[in-house]
Amino acid sequence: MNQFVQRIANWMANEIFIKGLAESKTFQRFAVRTDRHVRKYKEEGFEHVNAQIDELHKQATRAAYSTSAGGGGSASNTASGGAGGNALRAPQKPLGGISGFFGALGRVIRRDLGIDKKT
């Protein structure tokens, strides 16, 4: 009996509210205007994110070329530090598997104990 009452209530809500809203010009204008605003803000958001990514890429490229060109930071590092110990280097791929794990664990333990001076 309870399911029967629920079905009648759902049918009534469908007939009155949903069909009434679908036929309402005011609701249609509201829906179209809301959709237009959502699309506009979504597009502006994508443009803003793309602009930020482009700016980050430009800065990263400038930084990479200024350090790898040999003139900027590496000349001062070789003059003061001998063999250029503070020069930027490309990251190396870590060892995989159990040997890589124990190697990394050993480096962390040496650094924590003060044996390894690299940070």
Image: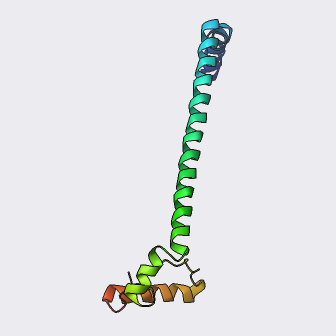
- Quarter residue 10 falls in: top right
Residue 109 seen in the figure: no
Identify the image quadrant of the C terminus.
bottom left
Residue 104 placed where, x, y %?
Answer: 48, 85
From the viewer's side, name the closer residue of 10 and 43.
43
Residue 33 seen in the figure: yes
Q: Residue at x 44, y 89 (%)?
A: 106
Residue 41 placed where, x, y %?
Answer: 56, 31
Q: How many marks do you count on the picture?
A: 0
Is 69 left or right of 73, judged from the image as shown?
A: right
Residue 27 vertical position relative to residue 72 in the rendered view, above or below:
above
Q: Residue at x 58, y 85 (%)?
A: 95
Residue 113 vertical position relative to residue 56 in the rendered view, above or below:
below
From the viewer's side, name the closer residue of 49 and 86.
86
From the viewer's side, name the closer residue of 21 and 81.
81
- Quarter residue 47 falls in: top right
Residue 40 placed where, x, y %?
Answer: 59, 29
Q: Residue at x 68, y 8 (%)?
A: 23
Residue 101 placed where, x, y %?
Answer: 52, 84
Extreme residue toward the front, this view: 71
Q: Residue at x 58, y 51 (%)?
A: 54
Query: Which color mode does the image show?
Result: rainbow
Extreme residue toward the left, this view: 114
Residue 103 vertical position relative to residue 12 in the rendered view, above or below:
below
Identify the image quadrant of the N terminus.
top right
- Quarter residue 9 falls in: top right
